Amino acid sequence: MIQAAPTYRGKVRDTYDLGDRLLLVTTDRVSAFDRHIATIPHKGAVLNQLSAWWFEQTKDIVDNHFLAMPKPNSMEVKKCRVFPVEVVMRGYMTGTTNTSVWTLYQQGERRFFETTLPDGLHKNMPLPHTMMTPSTKSDEHDEPLTVEQLDNLPGLTLEQWMRIREKAFALFAYGQEVARQKGLILVDTKYEFGLDDEGNILLIDECHTPDSSRYWLVDSYQERIAQGKEPENFDKEFLRLWFRQNCDPYHDEVLPEAPAELVQQLSTRYQDIFQRLTGHALVK
């Protein structure tokens, strides 16, 4: 039996301390703009089971914290010391949040961590090459890191960072290839890493889920871009776009309730991408 209240309540996951391991319960909460915006049926089960699937697929690239999946929306994991950085990998120029590359690029920013982008890029087009944009790890608001800031980040050595950097590029390249084989584009994603008691760097939290990643449909991508439309997506981006169009999600004290049809549509998309990627039906 787990204790009545979680040891830690995150934006999406509730964490229970089981002594020598943790129990992560993935809820149906959706977070964006640094706040809760909606609750999507079966989202927790999708994120949990898809992460478990990706952890299995990627363990030869980097080991991970997964131990067992006692319920459809929960997993037992190895305890780790979490590195204080979120590693964001990007393959396309896109985004709607204030910290997205597209938003900052429109404002004149060209330098993103190790990469300087040229002028003339357009929304939703491929970047010149895969780009890494690490950020601070925070419950309130993640901030992009510069190379200089990362070099002086407490709790992370240069050797550890170089190992994390190598694994992040390898994971993203593999994820993109698997997605292509399933008719999908893995647009961007974020990774978190931790250090176990033996000093091993592990992939933790989640992997290539529609919450931590953006997925587009390959077949319609070129046509929709040519028509000036947003790509067909399987993540929460269209829900973010709705809030952007109907309120100020960063500053309004109370947000409007997401339309029921959008909530159901997103639930269906989450389950669809799970089946596309894994070939299995979701266990609810």
Image (cartoon, rainbow, N blue to C red):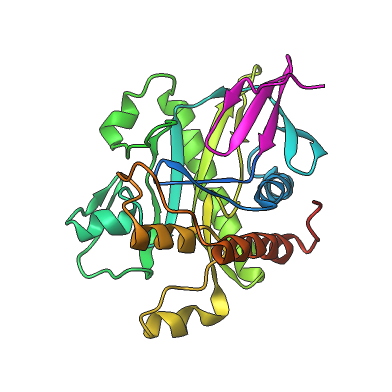
Closer to the camera, 14 or 253? 253
Asked whether, in this view, residue 168 is left or right of residue 225, the answer is right
Residue 8 belongs to magenta span: yes
Specify start and end residues of the magenta stretch as a single range. Answer: 1-26
Give the image quarter of residue 276.
bottom right
Asked whether, in this view, residue 68 is left or right of residue 189, the answer is right
Residue at 48% from the left image edge and 60% from the top image edge: 239
Residue 148, given in percent of the width and then of the height, sits at 26, 31
Residue at 67% from the left image edge and 53% from the top image edge: 41
Quadrant, the N terminus: top right
Give the image quarter of residue 177.
bottom right
Residue 26, given in percent of the width and then of the height, sits at 66, 39
Residue 155 belongs to magenta span: no
Residue at 40% from the left image edge and 57% from the top image edge: 243
Closer to the camera, 53 or 132? 53
In the picture as drawn, the residue positioned furthest to the top comes out as 19
